[in-house]
Image (cartoon, rainbow, N blue to C red):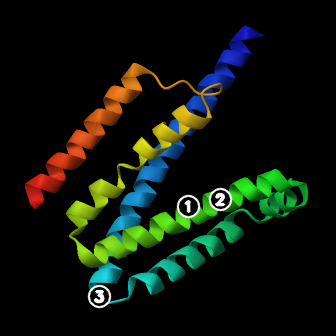
Amino acid sequence: MTNMIEEGKGRRAVQGYLASVGSAAGYGFGTYFAYLVIRDGVPPMTATFFSLVFGLLLMALLFPRPVLIDLKLATLRGWVVVSMSGLASAFGVTSFYLSLDRVSVVIASPVAGANPLVAILMTHIFLQRLERVSIRTVIGAVLVVAGVALVTIGTA
């Protein structure tokens, strides 16, 4: 029984890592395409709108059944939290597109890529009982900040 539990955790962890790699690839390709759109003169707000609309349509096409089920099961608290997440994501996408309109992609991308620092801080503040922020995590975050600073200073 213990082996089955451990196998499940291992499989789940592998799926999590693969999803993280998919996330990195998606954001990387998204950054490239966003840069092309902004470089071609599309206003950042227009690019943001269409980016989010196409993302919504793709999610609805790929996962229609789970979404319909979740719509029925969602609690008020769930709606509030997911709405806050959506607003934060929309703010991030909008800010990123605006940054691409004003600075080089080699500046905007690494600075925007420092978003895990915000996640670490929020986790430390609000989720102390659920997630532990280790010294290794803090050191990694410091290295991220140092890398962003080097890229920003080196290309300025």
The numbered mark, 3 or 2, whose residue comes first in the sequence reads 3
Q: Quadrant of residue 53?
A: bottom right
Q: Position of residue 43 (x, y in %)?
A: 38, 88
Determine the CA span between mark 2 and mark 1: 6 Å
Q: Is residue 5 above or below residue 119?
A: above
Q: Are marks 3 and 2 in contact (CB under 8 Å)?
A: no
Q: Amino acid at mark 1?
A: Ala
- The residue sitting at 28% across, 63% down in the picture is 108
Q: Quadrant of the C terminus?
A: bottom left
Q: For the residues carrying marks 3 and 1, which lies nearer the camera in this image?
A: 1
Determine the CA span between mark 3 and mark 2: 32 Å
Q: Mark 3 highlights which residue?
A: 40
Q: Residues within 10 Å of mark 1 (few under 14, many from 20)?
A: few
Determine the CA span between mark 3 and mark 1: 26 Å
25 vs 147, left or right, is right
The numbered mark, 3 or 1, whose residue comes first in the sequence reads 3
Q: Is residue 27 above or below residue 39?
A: above
Q: Quadrant of residue 38?
A: bottom left
Q: Mark 1 highlights which residue?
A: 88
Q: Position of residue 117 (x, y in %)?
A: 40, 42
Q: Position of residue 77 (x, y in %)?
A: 80, 51
Residue at the extreme top: 2
Q: Quadrant of the N terminus?
A: top right
Q: Are marks 2 and 1 in contact (CB under 8 Å)?
A: yes
Q: Position of residue 118 (x, y in %)?
A: 45, 45
Q: Mark 2 highlights which residue?
A: 84
Of 6 and 76, the residue lying toward us? 76
Q: Amino acid at mark 2?
A: Met
- The residue sitting at 37% across, 89% down in the picture is 42
- The residue sitting at 43% across, 44% down in the picture is 116
